[in-house]
Amino acid sequence: MDDASWAALTLSLTVAGGIWTWLAFRRRGLASGLRALGFTLLPPAAYLTKTLQMFTGIAGEIGDWAGNLVWNPMVWSGIVVGAVGIGLIVISGALRTRQVARSEGPSAAGPRELPAKRTSEAGQPALAGDDDMAEIEAILRKRGIS
């Protein structure tokens, strides 16, 4: 497209935005009108900075890519190969988890035993020197909790 075509596109977008801005000011007030005015000023800014051409080029390339994705059997075979690869990775992770659980044996899966009660060298409980703890132990023994 030549420069006159881009200018015509910009002018038409700006005029449509101007009508939208005027309606927004009249119907919804200052805040909506200012927002619409901001959007209305974007096409001339894109034209002046030559980004309007860039955006349409990007949109064209995305369209070409999407068309190639839909109609090209080589692309679909690549998608199938990628899906098979991802599936194999997931399956191998599940198998690895299973192998680790088997190699640790049933003791790893079962409940763990509590550590043995600590006692001092004389065979007394570890906290026997503490009077408060001795009272608590006596209360627990009285209630059948050891």
Image (cartoon, rainbow, N blue to C red):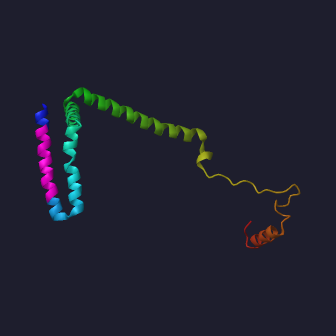
Q: What's the residue at 26%, 31% (across, down)?
A: 76
Q: Nearer the viewer, residue 50 or 88?
A: 50
Q: Quadrant of the C terminus?
A: bottom right
Q: In the depicted view, which residue is nearer to us: 117 or 16?
A: 16
**Position in image of residue 99 (x %, y %):** 53, 37
Q: Is residue 112 above or below residue 65?
A: below
Residue 69 % position (x, y): 23, 32
- Residue 1 appears in view: no
Toward the viewer: 136 or 143?
136
Locate residue 125: give its quadrant. Answer: bottom right
Q: Residue furthest right?
A: 122
Q: Is residue 132 left or right of residue 103?
A: right
Which span of residues is magenta-colored? 7-22
Give the left or right position of residue 11, taking residue 139 as reference: left
Q: Is residue 10 visible?
A: yes
Give me the residue at 22% from left, 28% from top.
73
* Above/below status of 125 relative to 18: below
Q: Residue 53 in the image: state x and y as whole percent.
A: 20, 34
Q: Position of residue 96 (x, y in %)?
A: 50, 37
Residue at point 76%, 73% (across, down): 139
Give the left or right position of residue 109, taking residue 128 as reference.
left
Q: Main secondary structure of the magenta part?
A: helix
Tell which residue pokes out farthest to the top in this image: 74
State the quadrant of the N terminus: top left
Viewer-side residue, 11 vs 52: 11
Report which quarter residue 49 is drawn in.
Answer: top left
Residue 111 among those drawn in magenta:
no
The residue depicted at 21 percent of the width and 38 percent of the height is: 48
Q: Is residue 11 left or right of residue 115?
A: left
